Image (cartoon, rainbow, N blue to C red):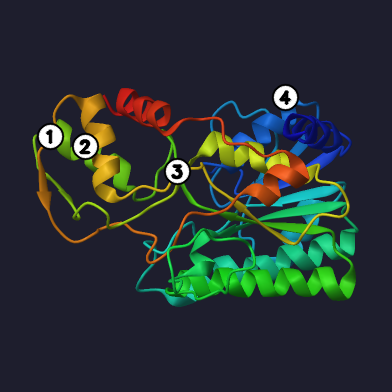
Amino acid sequence: MRTNAARYAFERAKTVERVLVTGSSGLIGHRVAGLLIASGVSVQGFDLRPPPAGAPFPAQVGSLADDEAVAAAMRGCDAVVHFGAVSGPMLLLDNPAAIATANVGACMAVFAAAHRAGVRRLVWASSIAVYGDQATLDPVTEDAPLHPASFYAETKVAGEALLHGYVRHYGLDAIALRLSTVYGPDRQTPCALRDMIVATREGRPVAVSAPGSGQRQYIHADDAARAVLCALGAPPDHRFAYNISGGTWLAEAEVAERLRTLLRAMTTIEGPAAWSDGHLGPLVIEAARRDFGYEPRVDLHDGLAEMVRQIG
C-alpha cells in the first residue's frame, strides 16, 4: 500500500509541467530540482545565490521579498516548491528583522503570487521547530499544539498561518512539510554532526550532553527532497501539514557514539546539550506514509558515513 502510494505520488508529480523552486541553490532545493528534471519536469530556480556550476535549469538571482521578481519567475509555472528561507534558529540570532523578511515577507510574496498565477500545487518547508517544548515526550502527531520556542520558530508558525489562510479563504492547494533537522554532505550552515567530525579530525574533544538528553531527529537531504516530490503528487484530499523525518529519535550521546564507530576514535567530555529539539518526542510520520507514500530511505549510519568521507 505504501509503495503504491509513493508510486502514485511520483507519477502524479510528473503531470506538472514547470515548477518554480525557491531556494534552488540550497541543500534541499537543488536536490528537488534535480529529481524534478530527472522525472521530465521543467524547473525555474530562484535564490539569493547563483545555482551550482552546471545546474541544468535556469535560475533567477534575487530577493523573495521582491513581489515583482517573484511574480516574473512564476510565469508559466503550474506548481511551486518554496524552500527559500533562513534555515534554522541558529542563524541571524541578532537580526530578527532579517529572519522575518526571509521567512514571513518572502512567504507572503510567494503565496500571493501562487494564488494569482492559479498554480495547481504549492509545497512549503515548515519545520519541527513549530512544536517547541511539549508537555510529554510522547510521539508527536500533526495535531500536537504549537509552542514555538525561538524567533525562527515563530516565523514558521506565522508562515503556516499565512499559508492556511490562502488555503481556506482563497482555495490555494498547498501542503506544509514540518521537516526535522536536515543533514547531508553539502550542508553549509552550522551543523552538530559536522562539528563533531571536524573536532575529532583535529584531535579536539567533543562535548556531548549526558545520555538520554539532547534528543534530535535527523533527516537526510535526499529523503527531504523525495518527500517534496511525493507531496507535489499527493491526492487532492490531502491534509494541510505533514511531519517529515528520517525515522530516528536519538540523544546527543547516541549520535556521538554512532560517529565514534565511523571515526574509530572520539574523545568526549560531558557538557550541556549544544544541539537539541527541546522537550519533544519522536515525530509520527504515518500521515505522510499513508497519503503520499513517504518513507525515509537513507539510514543514519549511511548518511553519517557519507559525511565522514566528504570531510576527510
Q: Which residue is at a point 13% across and 28% down the rendered structure image?
A: 265
Gap in angstroms between the C-alphas marked 1 and 3: 28 Å
Residue designated by label 2:
198
Among numbered discs 2 and 4, the one appearing first in the sequence: 4
Among numbered discs 2 and 3, the one appearing first in the sequence: 2
Q: In what quadrant of the picture does the N terminus appear? A: top right
Gap in angstroms between the C-alphas marked 1 and 2: 6 Å
Whether 113 is drawn above or below 225: the answer is below
Residue 202's tag is 1
Gap in angstroms between the C-alphas marked 3 and 4: 29 Å
- Left or right for 213, reference 277: left
Task: Place residue 304 in its image quadrant.
Answer: top left
Among numbered discs 1 and 3, the one appearing first in the sequence: 1
Residue 248's tag is 3
- Left or right for 303, reference 205: right
Q: Mark 1 or mark 3, which is nearer to you?
A: 3
Name the spot of residue 113 as percent of width and height, x first: 80, 63
Local packing at callout 1 (Cα closer than 10 Å; few below 14, some 14-19, many 20+) is: few
* Mark 4: amino acid: Ala
Local packing at callout 3 (Cα closer than 10 Å; few below 14, some 14-19, many 20+) is: some
Name the spot of residue 24 as percent of width and height, x first: 61, 43
Among numbered discs 4 and 1, the one appearing first in the sequence: 4
Whether 294 is drawn above or below 309: the answer is below
From the viewer's side, name the closer residue of 164 and 85.
164
Q: Mark 3 or mark 4, which is nearer to you?
A: 3
Whether 118 is drawn above or below 9: the answer is below
Among numbered discs 3 and 4, the one appearing first in the sequence: 4
Residue designated by label 4:
38
